[in-house]
Amino acid sequence: MSATAPATYRASSSPRPQALRTDRRLTAWSWVRAALIVVVCLVLALPVVWMIAAAFKTNVQVTDPSVGLFFTPTLENFGNVLADGEIVRSLGNSALVGVVSTVLSALVAVPAAWAVGRFRMRRTGSLVLVARIVPAVSLLVPWYYIFAQLGLVGSYTVLVLSHMFVSVPLILWIMIGFFEGLPIELEEAARTDGLSAFGAFRHIALPLAAPGTATACVLAFIFSWNNFMFALILADETTKTMPVALYNFISYASTDWGGLMAASTLMIVPVLLAAVFGQKFLVAGLTAGATKG
Amino acid sequence: MSVTTSGTLGRAPVADPAPASRRPAGRRRRAGSFAGENRRLKWLMLSPALGFVGLLIVFPLVFTLNLSLTDAFGAVNAGSQHVGLLNFGDALTDTRRFWPAVGRTVGFTVGAVVLETVLGLALAVLLRRPFRGMRVVRTVLMVPLLATPVAVGILWLLILDPTNGIANHLLGYLGVPPQEFLGSVRQSLPVLMLIDVWQWTPMMTLLFLAGLSTLPEEPEEAARVDGAGVWQRFWFVILPMLAPTLITALVLRAVDALKTFDILYATKGPGGGSDFEVETLNVYAYGLTFDYQEYGLAAAVLVLFTIFIVGVVALLRRGSGKESA
């Protein structure tokens, strides 16, 4: 442990006491480091823990800050929220829009990412950045304008298409880097053995890229699941997604803190599960492309 | 639409007529013989994505640009007339809503991004060397940045509630009088900026950790042997090597911070509160469009906003070019 912590070495005439002192400093530093890491984790995690705890409190307990993290939990809030058809339907809508938009995005983006990565089309690939830069509202205005005239506002089609605006560039971005990292020789060997170019993609590159695709799809789903702005405008009462339902909940039930916290907890549980079980892959996906400069 | 296009994709290689026949490169067997087929496939694979980008991004952007030159207002199928640059003039002379929104956008972004970069870097250095429990810490880092922004807004509304929140309760122990937090015109934007720091510092840390893991060990080792202290090694060895990652992270975060919407709208509602206290350009443009149906003016604000973001990106990239050269 101690060897891993950065130490301060100084030129010294007497090596032995110096070594002793350095050792002591190293141990002291690793304790400080451990303490700092614990503090950081608490700062990041406690607000979320507080919210989840509040979801299990009665409304009296929620509004009494002296009730800490130790109390008799109740499932009453979850019962109320799940009995509310609107919340359940919104959760379903979020899942539906998330899955469909992610699958369609992968169908569009993975082949394109392969083409960009394989044929070194860096300039075409950098078009992806345009989609990251453009404010979503500036697309939402024309979408709304056009879809309203077509009478499509409120339909799942429009919601899925709008969510693809986020997930297509995201999957492209992650997968370009992934395909660039695959050795081209495998595909060339397959071609020499008689596979078509598409066959090489289908039977060689695609299976090898499965972990990357899975990571990209999970992240795309999470971003769709979290998306608020598109559904706020493009959904109607029956198609609205969970973040919009939560937002409405704030305004009409500001006193029902327990219910609000239970609904928010339902919203972030899938994401928490993904973070816990897919931590390594999701970190790789989130940081993809940032270290290449 | 996208399904059918990828369907044609599947059939493409079968219906491929005479591969590489008219290419002189076909003579070079090894590398060149696949070139013709490759080129066709390349564009086939790209076409669904390019079609998507064209239909849902480029076309709407052109539409917005056109809309910004009209007096579109009210019902979406009401006619509109071209009015030249009138909307841009209106926006740029509006000192009541537009310019304060610009100021808030810049203030929020600069404050959040600077804090996130400094804290993110410190945290990355802290977590850099392996230790037991690293996996747990990484998972904890992911939680704020993957959590739904609207839910994050709600959880901070609970914590920062002026009368019943735990924040004021804890501050009471320190002898600090109760704060209004999001209920106050003056404190709202700084508080939301700090929430943004809570949510996005982990992202910077993850990016910096990824960057640090790619750096060679030798330069730092050499500096240590030459007697450089911790700070010297950080400033003169690690930081310059990390510069490309730093700039990329800065650009990505700045772009997202400029466009922050969800948490501002979820906690303060339309218009950024009663006194427009958290109304950034994004919230302003959104309100103009969907609360006031001022499509023309909103489009002009959005065009200006987009130009502004592109300018910031170009500026940061240019700064990075000088640094690495």
Image (cartoon, rainbow, N blue to C red):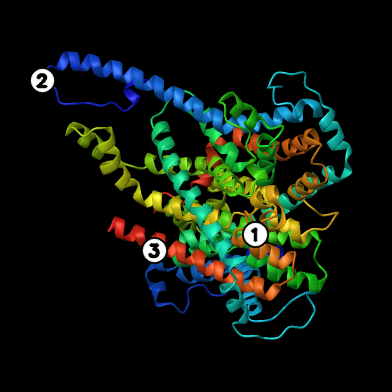
Residue A288, image x, y percentages: 48, 48
* Residue beneath disc 1: B283
Q: Quick one: which residue is furthest to the left in this view?
A: A13
> Callout 1: residue from which chain?
B
* Mark 2 in CB contact with mark 3 (< 8 angstroms): no
* Residue beneath disc 2: A13
Q: Residue at x 51, y 61 (%)?
A: A129
Marks 1 and 3 sit apart, C-alpha to C-alpha, by: 57 Å
* Residue beneath disc 3: B30
In the displayed structure, would residue A201 be above or below residue B115?
Answer: below
Whichever of callouts 1 and 3 sits on the residue coming sooner in the sequence is 3
Q: Residue at x 25, y 26 (%)?
A: A8
Marks 2 and 1 sit apart, C-alpha to C-alpha, by: 64 Å
Residue B222, image x, y percentages: 20, 36
Specify the amino acid type for callout 1.
Val
A251 left or right of A52?
Answer: right
Q: Quadrant of the C terminus of chain A?
A: bottom left
Q: Is residue A292 visible?
A: no
Mark seen at residue A186:
none
Q: Residue at x 77, y 83 (%)?
A: B79
Looking at the image, is mark 1 or mark 3 nearer the viewer?
1
Q: In this rendered view, identify the residue nearer to me: B97 or A232.
A: B97
Indicate the secondary structure of the residue bearing disc 2: loop
